[in-house]
Image: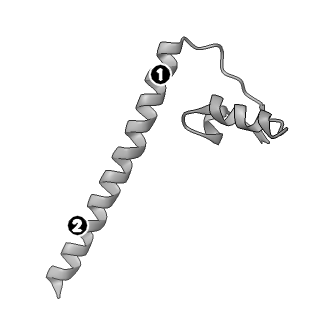
């Protein structure tokens, strides 16, 4: 498996995916390695990614619900 950046494969938990690949004899190649990041910085990036994903889902769901209410009110 070849990826450009590790976050293109998964937003967080790359080490777990890497371990699973190694256990199944799958070579995982990351072309653009980021520099060794401080564990605290990496944790902050992971938490921000999680918040971004869930807030996007929440706002998307709200938007869909609002559109449905508007459609029903027009009838």
Residue under label 2, please give it: 66
The residue closer to the viewer here, 39 or 45, is 39
Point out residue 11 in the picture as x, y percentages from the top left corner. 55, 37
> Is 14 left or right of 22, judged from the image as shown?
left
Q: Which part of the image, by quadrant, shows the N terminus?
A: top right
Q: Is residue 39 above or below residue 24?
A: above
Residue in the image at 71% along x and 37% along y: 20
Q: Is residue 15 above or below residue 54?
A: above
Q: Which mark is residue 43?
A: 1
Residue in the image at 67% along x and 33% along y: 5
Q: Furthest residue to the bottom?
A: 75
Q: Furthest residue to the front?
A: 23
Secondary structure found at label 1: helix
Residue in the image at 63% along x and 32% along y: 16
Q: Earlier in the sequence, mark 1 or mark 2?
A: 1
Mark 1–mark 2 Cα distance, whole angstroms, equals 34 Å
Secondary structure found at label 2: helix
Q: Is residue 1 above or below residue 14?
A: below
The residue closer to the viewer here, 71 or 50, is 50
Point out residue 75 in the picture as x, y percentages from the top left corner. 17, 88
Q: Which mark is residue 69?
A: none
> Is 28 left or right of 17, judged from the image as shown?
right
Point out residue 74 in the picture as x, y percentages from the top left corner. 16, 83
């Amino acid at each position: 498996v070849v990826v450009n950046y590790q976050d293109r494969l998964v937003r967080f938990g790359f080490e777990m995916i890497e371990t699973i690949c190694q256990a199944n004899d799958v070579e995982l190649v990351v072309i653009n390695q980021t520099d060794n990041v401080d564990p605290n910085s990496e944790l902050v990036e992971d938490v921000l990614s999680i918040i971004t994903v869930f807030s996007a889902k929440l706002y998307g769901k709200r938007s869909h619900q609002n559109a449905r209410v508007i459609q029903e009110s027009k009838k």
